Amino acid sequence: MRLSIVTIGSEGDTRPLAALCRGLLDRGHEVQLFADESTLSAPRAAGVPSESLQGDIKSILPVGDPRQKFRLSEALRVGRNLKEFIAQHSAAWLRAVGAHATGSDAVLFSSLALNIGLTLSEALRKPCMGLMFQPFAPTRAFSFPGMPPLKLPGWANLWTYRIMQRQMRKLFGAKARIGYDFPVLCGLSRELVTRPDDWPKDHIICGHWYNGQVNWQPPSDLVDFIGDTPPFYAGFGSPSAFLRAEALQALIDGVAGRRVVFSPGWSR
């Protein structure tokens, strides 16, 4: 099969998709990954055909002092910036991905590229599939993952997904096609999320996507540090833009007295 795969997220979106693409290539499929230029080192290292999309998603993230609280004003500004970012670049994204998707068998997309994928699928009459990194479809089992972890009754959990749907319409535009009537693969662990009974049958939790064939050797000081006692690992990508004082303290409390390896990532 020939597949067009698109994401407009940061490196935390592109890396797992690079691993998925590598797996598809190894099984004889033809793929092209479209993503932010700043995130393409992983797919290129894995030999995944890729093309950069216009814009720089990292430029809109509020990377600040992690010791300071994340303010509501910052959250509102990120929302405005993301809406402007999508409006400014959507046409270019559609042209770039559409040129390849015209000859593809299907279009696959991550959550932030949902409107791009669905629009092309509908316009080109191609099958499509969502590639998500968190639970996506409405369920009575738990609230929308982007909200605070609240223990709510089933009807209220469903209501949180309606809120999310309204916010996505504001983000992508009133005419955006937002729905759940397409197959979805969730690249997350069943140990973290049990598949809800009320999900559509073609929404599947399939485990994390990672490239186990990367030829990487840890530095000797890291090997010595790990020793016989595996440490905890804490990685920081784009969420660190929002994880400030309270989350930082919770992390410090959680690993206190234990061995831990911190990986700051691009956010430093």
Image (tube, rainbow, N blue to C red):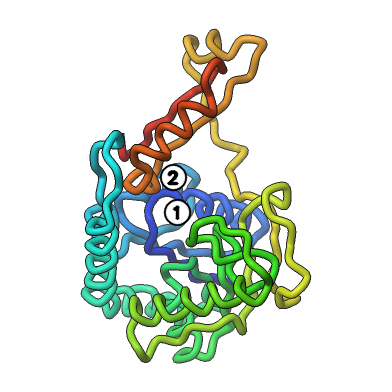
Question: Which numbered marker is on residue 14?
Answer: 1
Give the quadrant of residue 119. Answer: bottom left
Q: Dot 1 lies on which element?
A: helix
Residue shown at 42% from the left, 32% from the top:
249
Provide residue 57's location: percent of width, then percent of height.
29, 58
Q: Secondary structure at mark 2?
A: helix
Q: Which residue is mark 2?
A: 42
Where is 120 relative to 108, above or below?
below
Residue 11's spot in the image, x, y percent?
40, 49
Q: Amino acid at mark 1?
A: Thr
Query: Given contact means CB atoms under 8 Å apart, are the residues at marks 1 and 2 in contact?
Result: yes
Q: Is residue 101 left or right of residue 99?
A: right
Which residue lies at the image location 58% right of the left edge and 68% below the top edge? Answer: 136
The residue at the far right in this view is: 197
Quarter of image, res 83: bottom left
Provide residue 26's location: percent of width, then percent of height. 64, 53
Q: Amino acid at mark 2?
A: Ala
* Quadrant in which the N terminus is drawn: bottom right
Numbered circle sitting on residue 182: none
Quadrant, the C terminus: top left
Q: What is the CA distance from the residue labelled 1 to the residue labelled 2?
A: 8 Å
Question: Which residue is located at x 52 percent, y 64 percent?
Answer: 31
Q: Nearer the viewer, residue 260 or 65?
A: 65
132 over 140 or under it: above or below: above
**Residue positioned 49% across, 90% down in the render:** 122
